[in-house]
Image: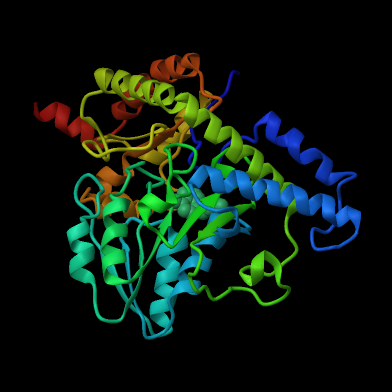
Amino acid sequence: MHRIYLDNNATTPVLPEVFEAMRPYFGDQFGNASSIHSHGQQTRAAVEDARESVAALIGCRASEIVFTSGGTEADNLAIAGLARAGDHVITSGIEHHAVLLACRHLEEIGAELTVLPVDGRGLVDPGDVRRALRPNTKLISVMMANNEIGVLQPVEDIGKIAAEAGVCFHTDAVQAAGKVAIDGNRIGCHALSISGHKIHAPQGVGALFVRKGTRLQPLFYGGRHERSRRAGTENVPGIVGLGKAARLAKQALDRGDDKKMAALRDRLQQGILAHVDEAGVNGDGAARVPNTANLRFDHIDGEALVIALDLKGLAVSTGAACSSGAIEASHVLLAMGLRPDQARASIRFSLGKQTTAEDIEIALALVPETVARLREISPSYKRQAISI
Ligand code: PLP
């Protein structure tokens, strides 16, 4: 069976070029990047080269990049590193749990927390951010692109509000990196998180941009790695992979590959909606990253649709990977005002660099017929059909 993978917001396959770039660092190039002998110097050079590539992808200086074990650690480092007990922190209700739960933990240890609502499109109102400011506000953390709906937040406006108020601004750009151009200076953020495995690098590596001059409390105590911002021997193969993937992502954005991906996503979305009634796009009306379509199919159970499509060779998701298998509805969709049954009837399609036009045509053939079959056994769909 030809399997089609449309769950690239959960994770992406490592590109062959990325794998090849990493390979020597599992073999001859094994040195500890902190060692002063030539083994160490070689890996140090590779780490610094990767740092340049990551900096180029997000529009900052190489010295402002801190390598981490992934997006979760980058988010936690930003939140625990920039605010503490007694400070006030502002975030949104649609953040990834790496941000939301890190903020909740801060609240538990004595910080004040404001969790902002979003509108029906999944957008934070910058006016709400301004109104939430308090004399002790230390940090605003609002994501750049949401992992479930792909909606892009008004981060530049929020950055301006933060700058005027003299407050730190962190943005989780894990789902934006490589999909839209990022310019850390234009956003005006003090910290920005990215993750390797969302941009075709391996799992378990990421980075946090920390603006020069920003005081950051480290999460770990140990060696003086990463300019004392993140202790621990660097994951050289992972960092090299992240650097290569960042370089390829930047080249692809410069070529305009994002427009091709948006065209494929739009074809998928429009084709499905043309053949399925009582369906809609979550996040419609807002700017979105080019690879994501979160669709709602009323009267069906999203988990059942994911399983039925998987049996036919199509991998999609009900939203955040960690919530698959759990019964509770997505906090993102609920925050947007969907009813729990509508949230549970929603499916995320997310494309990657490997997605082809043929994949989209196959998905277009599979989804409407599978939804129709599930609706045949749906009590709420039947009830409605009888009452018509
Ligand atoms: N932030 C967002 C928006 C994400 O989508 C994810 C992963 O799904 C993370 C953070 C966590 O990244 P990682 O899996 O690298 O820890």
The structure's colour scheme is rainbow
Q: Residue at image x 86%, y 47%?
A: 29
Q: Residue at image x 38%, y 37%?
A: 289
324 relative to 301, above or below: below
- Expressed as whole percent of the image width and height from the top left, the position of residue 75 reads 49, 62
In the rendered image, the quadrant that contains the C terminus is top left
Q: Residue at image x 31%, y 61%?
A: 92
- Expressed as whole percent of the image width and height from the top left, the position of residue 313 reads 54, 24
190 relative to 38, above or below: below
In the rendered image, the quadrant that contains the N terminus is top right
- Expressed as whole percent of the image width and height from the top left, the position of residue 168 reads 38, 68
Choose top left, top right, bottom left or bottom right for residue 328: bottom left
- Residues 128 and 53: in front is 53
Q: Is residue 29 left or right of residue 386?
A: right
- Residues 363 and 247: in front is 247
Q: Is residue 35 left or right of residue 261?
A: right
Q: Residue at image x 33%, y 39%?
A: 346
131 relative to 257, above or below: below
